[in-house]
């Protein structure tokens, strides 16, 4: 685990819930203002603001539950199994995807998103938690000079 990250279960669960809620709220704020404003809300700032807050809460709650499910199951699996490996993350991804699909309300979506998040978590754990491998930062390409003039 990287330095600076919490290792105890309550901190990991709170971090999963909080970061999921914040990310979902930001996404909800963007999603609520992306399309055209309904005719009944045009030139009426208060109802539009209430609608934006409602959409932000819905998205924040959904991704907060996903983060909560992932971190809780990951932590429980780690404490039961006594190991920190890819299986714990896969089980957490399975629970998080299932929570996301159940929040949508369809069983097929729940199964598909559970499988997708389990595979994604397995891939991240297999890569050591890095998004980029050795090929990207191998030093073969010279760094780009941002400021062409010497100071």
Image (spheres, rainbow, N blue to C red):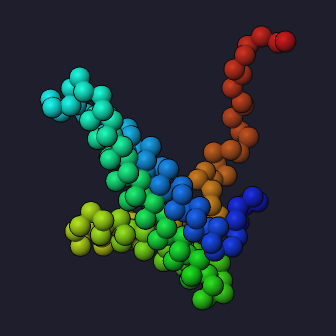
Q: Is residue 15 left or right of residue 99?
A: right
- Residue depicted at x 82% and y 12%: 150
Residue 1 horizontal/vertical position (percent): 71, 66
User: What percent of the width, then of the height, locates residue 127?
Assistant: 61, 63
Left or right: 126 in relation to 117: right
Q: Is residue 36 visible?
A: no
- Dividing the picture into quadrants, the one containing residue 81 is bottom right
Work out which quarter of the rendered image holds the C terminus and state it: top right
Seen in the picture, residue 136 relative to 84 is either above or below; the reply is above
- Above or below residue 44? Residue 95 is below
Which of the 4 quarters of the picture holds residue 5? bottom right
Q: For the image shown, how many numbered marks are present on the structure? A: 0
Q: Is residue 79 above or below residue 67?
A: below
Q: Quadrant of residue 12?
A: bottom right
Specify whether residue 129 is in view: yes
- Name the residue: 43% across, 47% down: 25
| Residue found at the very far front of the displayed protein | 46
Q: Position of residue 113 (x, y in %)?
A: 34, 66
In the figure, is residue 115 to the left or right of 68?
left
What residue is rendered at 71% in x and 39% in y?
A: 140
Q: Position of residue 84 (x, y in %)?
A: 65, 78
Query: Furthest-right residue in view?
Result: 151
Answer above or below: position of 56 versus 111. Answer: above
């Amino acid at each position: 685990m990287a330095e600076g990250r919490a290792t105890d279960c309550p901190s990991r669960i709170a971090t999963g819930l909080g970061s999921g809620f914040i990310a979902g709220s930001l996404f909800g704020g963007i999603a609520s203002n992306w399309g055209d404003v309904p005719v009944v809300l045009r030139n009426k700032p208060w109802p539009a603001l209430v609608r934006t807050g409602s959409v932000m809460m819905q998205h924040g709650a959904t991704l907060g539950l996903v983060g909560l499910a992932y971190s809780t199951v990951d932590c429980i699996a780690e404490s039961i199994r006594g190991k920190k490996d890819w299986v714990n993350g896969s089980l957490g991804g399975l629970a998080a995807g299932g929570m996301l699909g159940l929040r949508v309300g369809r069983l097929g979506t729940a199964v598909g998103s559970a499988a997708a998040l389990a595979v994604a978590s397995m891939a991240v754990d297999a890569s050591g938690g890095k998004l980029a491998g050795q090929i990207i930062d191998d030093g073969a390409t010279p760094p780009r000079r941002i400021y062409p003039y010497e100071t």
